[in-house]
Every structure is written in structure tokens, then in C-alpha cells.
Image (cartoon, rainbow, N blue to C red):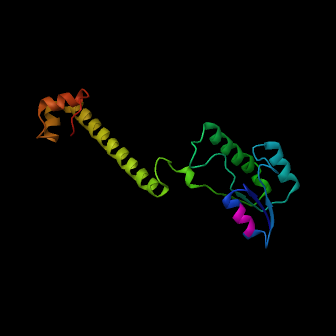
């Protein structure tokens, strides 16, 4: 089987190459021998090599000690696009990511927990907005009396303030 491994100098690519080279014909590329940011070079590579599987481990940026720039994002998208545009010339594409794709403000183990907290907060905010929409619609169709029936313990002044955008909790 003919396998292309991008990012062969990186940890994942280097170890995949060691393991796969025993039973396969492995093309292990790095920036030195195939710049996958260069569309014409990638197209040329696929024209002259019969590849079965592409294992894409190359990355621009992705270091925990350095903040990525927008340029890193652009380069990663270009690399992926240059491979994917040749999809007719290989059977499978396996794309490896890293922990650097998670929010780096948190340890990778804590990133999932933080994402869940942020989602819960967004859901709570959306619920409050839906509640306010319900209050406004009830007020518009039935007046303050109907809103008071919905919230019998809420004083009229608070309802009026909320309808005007004042910050009380319902």
C-alpha cells in the first residue's frame, strides 16, 4: 500500500512512519521535500505517485508555548485544501489534530469541562431571552394583567422595568 505521511518530522508523523514503513511503501514528507502549502507541488506529487492513503499530520503553529497567528490558521487551511483538492487521486484521508486545537487558556484535560460550562451559560442566557420574549408577547396581547397572572409574585413596577430592559431576574 502507498501511504503519504505529511509532517514526517513531527512526533506523530515520525512514529507513524516507523511503524508503517515495515509493510507499506511510505512517502514521508516534510517542508524540506514537499511543501504542501504549494498547490502546484502537491498537484504534481499526486500526478506522479499512486497514493492509497494520505495521513495528514503537518501543522503550522500548534505550539503550547506560542500563540498562533491568523497566518497559522490560513496555512493550515491551505495545506488541508491542497490535499483535499486531489481527493480523486487517493482512497482515504486521515487528518490528525492536536490538543493545541482546544482552548489554550486551560489545560487540555480541563478544556472539555470549560466548554461544557460555557455551553451551560449560553443555554441559560438563551432561556432568559426566551422568557423575556414570552413576557413581551403576553404583555402586547393581553397587557400587564396577563403578565401578572404568569408571575403573581412579581410587582407591577418590576414587570414594567423588565419590559423596558431593566436588569431584574425573573
22 over 98 or under it: above or below: below
149 over 32 or under it: above or below: above
Query: Quick check: 32 left or right of 96?
Result: right
**Is 142 a magenta residue?**
no
Of all residues, the one furthest to the bottom in this rendering is: 23
Residue at image point 78% right, 69% down? 21
Query: Quick check: 131 left or right of 39?
Result: left
Of all residues, the one furthest to the top in this rendering is: 164
Within the image, what quadrant is residue 136 found in?
Answer: top left
Residue at image point 74% right, 50% down? 83
Within the image, what quadrant is residue 131 found in?
Answer: top left
User: Of 153 and 67, which appears nearest the observer?
Assistant: 67
Query: Quick check: 110 left or right of 54?
Result: left
Of all residues, the one furthest to the front in this rendering is: 65
Decide whether the magenta segment is chiefly helix, strand or loop: helix
Residue 43 position within the rendered picture, expressed as x and y whole percent measured from the top left:
82, 47
Of all residues, the one furthest to the right in this rendering is: 48
Query: Quick check: 17 left or right of 159?
Result: right
Total numbered circles: 0
Residue 56 position within the rendered picture, expressed as x and y whole percent measured from the top left:
70, 56
Q: Which corner quadrant holds the C terminus?
A: top left
Q: Which corner quadrant holds the N terminus?
A: bottom right
User: Of 126 and 14, which appears nearest the observer?
Assistant: 14
Q: Residues in magenta? A: 14-18
Residue 97 position within the rendered picture, expressed as x and y whole percent measured from the top left:
61, 55
Residue 30 position within the rendered picture, expressed as x and y whole percent measured from the top left:
77, 53
Residue at image point 17% right, 32% down? 159
Amino acid at each position: 500500500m502507498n501511504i503519504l505521511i505529511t509532517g514526517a518530522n513531527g512526533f506523530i508523523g515520525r512514529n507513524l512512519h516507523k511503524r508503517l514503513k515495515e509493510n507499506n511503501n511510505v512517502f514521508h514528507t516534510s517542508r524540506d521535500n514537499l511543501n504542501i502549502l504549494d498547490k502546484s507541488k502537491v498537484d504534481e506529487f499526486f500526478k506522479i505517485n499512486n497514493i492509497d492513503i494520505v495521513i495528514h499530520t503537518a501543522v503550522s503553529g500548534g505550539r503550547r508555548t506560542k500563540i498562533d497567528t491568523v497566518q497559522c490558521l490560513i496555512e493550515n487551511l491551505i495545506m488541508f485544501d491542497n490535499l483535499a483538492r486531489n481527493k480523486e487521486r487517493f482512497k482515504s484521508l486521515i487528518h490528525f489534530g492536536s490538543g493545541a486545537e482546544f482552548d489554550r487558556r486551560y489545560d487540555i484535560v480541563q478544556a472539555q469541562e470549560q466548554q461544557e460550562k460555557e455551553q451551560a451559560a449560553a443555554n441559560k442566557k438563551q432561556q432568559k431571552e426566551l422568557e423575556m420574549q414570552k413576557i413581551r408577547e403576553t404583555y402586547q396581547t393581553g397587557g400587564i394583567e396577563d403578565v401578572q397572572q404568569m408571575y403573581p409574585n412579581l410587582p407591577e413596577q418590576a414587570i414594567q422595568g423588565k419590559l423596558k430592559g431593566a436588569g431584574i431576574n425573573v
